[in-house]
Amino acid sequence: MKHEDYAEVRNCYSRGDLIKEYEELYNKKGTWIFRGHKNEVWDLMTTLERLTCIIKPENFLSFEFGLLRKFKREFHLYSQRAPNFYDLIEWFSLMQHHGTPTRLLDCTYSFYVATYFALEDVEYNEENGAVWAINCQWLEDKLTNKYPHFKKAFTQSDRHLQSPKNLKKIINTSGVIRINPYYMHERLSVQQGCFLLSGNITEPFVNNLLASAGSRKELKKHLFKFVIKIKVNKSLRKEILKDLFRMNITRTSLFPGIDGYASSLKVSSYIFPEIFIPGKEYFKFIKLKKG
């Protein structure tokens, strides 16, 4: 299925185009969340869904809970605090955070953070990036109106689906809903992150979106894809990354710790190569080695 079949696709040829699209979106009703893709051709897929090359979709549920069981049993080796045994949203969040495939799709409330993720990897320098935007308030309203038995539990008493009874109502339902664990880890917090939870993982994520929306036409009103036209404007990636750097949106800020700082140097060397000038001690070292 082409993206144009279920999403409103807009092309952005400059920083101004991108900001204009965001401002227009900001003025629309609803609560918008975003996701950045390094390549415009990538589909909206969960990390679990990407495993179709080795696992049949009809076996995803069994496989998912096998992963969950394994992760739970050994998590205590790496952390002093473990979530409540039945709080699957927090477990899934931690699994996603540490690289285990899950039914969750990473998103952010920040358009600029999503834009950074779309453009940060300079190894994709010849590819158009893309920022997806979805009205998650509309998504929630559609799902809770469609399934009244789910509405009261999710919107009033158990917003984070900590109860297994309430979680089962969405896990056994075709649809998508925005969710966050009650206890958020650091990276999720600093990235202004949230998740989209896919209910029926035997079906593709996009099919779950369509199940919530009811039709492709309806979904297109609330799902946008902004294509950042790097192939046409070769300097666009660098221009936007410089702007985001001045806004302190870098790997250093989004991934606290030495790993985030170290990986941020790749982007820094791309947008500010002039700052990577070796000191006198380096030249002295080279001279000594040569001698």
Image (cartoon, grey):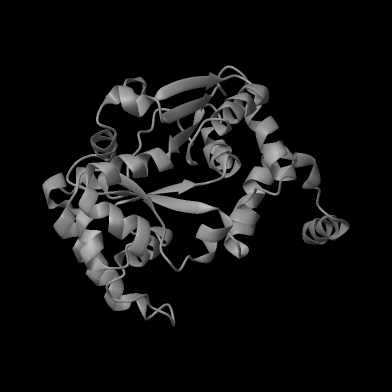
Q: Position of residue 258 (x, y in %)?
A: 62, 64
Say left or right for 260 vs 60.
Answer: right
Outermost residue to the left: 58
Q: Name the residue: 29% across, 37% down.
A: 209
| Residue 56 at least partly seen | no
Outermost residue to the right: 280
Q: Position of residue 186 (x, y in %)?
A: 54, 65
Say left or right for 110 vs 179.
Answer: right
Q: Name the residue: 60% across, 19% down.
A: 13
Say left or right for 95 vs 232.
Answer: left
* The C terminus - image quarter: bottom right
| Residue 88 at least partly seen | yes
As rendered, which of 69 and 215 lies closer to the eye? 215
* The N terminus - image quarter: top left
* As drawn, 106 above or below 207: below
Residue 80's image quarter?
bottom left
As rendered, which of 11 and 175 lies closer to the eye? 175
As rendered, which of 2 and 111 lies closer to the eye? 111
Q: Name the residue: 84% across, 55% down.
A: 279
Q: Position of residue 132 (x, y in %)?
A: 46, 34
Q: Name the residue: 75% across, 43% down.
A: 246
State how many labels appear: 0
Q: Position of residue 144 (x, y in %)?
A: 29, 46
